[in-house]
Amino acid sequence: MSLVPFLIAALVLAITPGPGIAYVVARTVAGGRGEGLASCLGTALGGMLHVLAAALGLSLLLAQSALAFSVLKYLGAAYLVYLGLRILLRQRPSPGPELPAVNASGARRAFFEGAVVEALNVKTALFFLAFLPQFVAPAQPLVGQLVFLGCICVTFNTLADVVAVLIAHRLLGGGAARAGRERLMTRVSGVTMLGLGAFLALARREA
């Protein structure tokens, strides 16, 4: 298991502003810190559903064909390269990601809706299917490795969301400085995905 490269990549991707952070910040703006934190817990639950689905699906695939699993790893690396290029080449009409429109609804509903939103996010499912297999050793028990790595991803993402909630008002009032930080972090994320995908596609696979 390639743990150190995984931790670096997962951390960089977690702190990069994206739809998840925008959603919990919007919840905070609409309903206060309580709703924001509840939505963080909800998205964490939704993320864990994706982790479990990926672990079970990929383990079944390996049981059927080691070759198919290797092909999936190469396709996953190519997908990460694609994501990196898309992030770097994306043209934004505004200086930062727009916040989704949400209304105050209470912490319990914020938790539930956060879980549903994340669980139904097809992009999250595709990302886990592409990202997690790059760091496992197919000769070792697969489900445990995938769940372990997935839990780290979800933990990093949730911590980033919580931090975003706690400093939401400051970020929203940052003006040009905020836009500059977001552009820098977006570029770092794009380059990280691009480099990671290329490295993993060219690296020798573990037995």
Image (tube, rainbow, N blue to C red):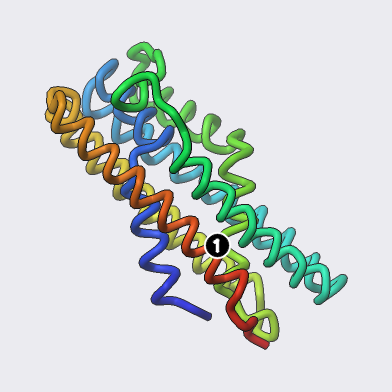
Residue 182 to residue 160: above or below: above
Secondary structure at numbered mark 1: helix
Q: Residue 85, how many percent across, how many down?
A: 52, 46
Choose between 86 and 178: the one closer to the eye: 86
Residue under pointer 1: 197
Which image quadrant for residue 31? top left
Q: Position of residue 145 (x, y in %)?
A: 57, 73
How many numbered badges does the structure rendering display?
Answer: 1
Q: Residue 197 location in percent, x, y?
A: 55, 62
Q: Is residue 198 left or right of residue 129?
A: left
Q: Residues within 10 Å of mark 1 (few under 14, many from 20)?
A: many
Choose between 133 and 108: the one closer to the eye. 133
- The residue that appears at 15% across and 24% down in the rendered structure is 175
- Position of residue 191 in the picture relative to residue 122 (left or right): left
Q: Residue at x 59, y 73 (%)?
A: 144
Q: Quadrant of residue 146?
A: bottom right
Q: Residue 140, relative to residue 18: is it above or below?
A: below
Type of amino acid at the residue the image marks with label 1: Gly
Classify 17 as above or below 7. above
Is residue 13 left or right of 69 when viewed as pictured? left
Image quadrant where one finds the C terminus = bottom right
Q: Residue at the location (68% across, 66% down)? A: 73
**Residue 22 occupies quadrant:** top left
- Residue drawn at x 35%, y 43% as measured from the top left: 186
Percent across and percent down for residue 179 are 23, 30
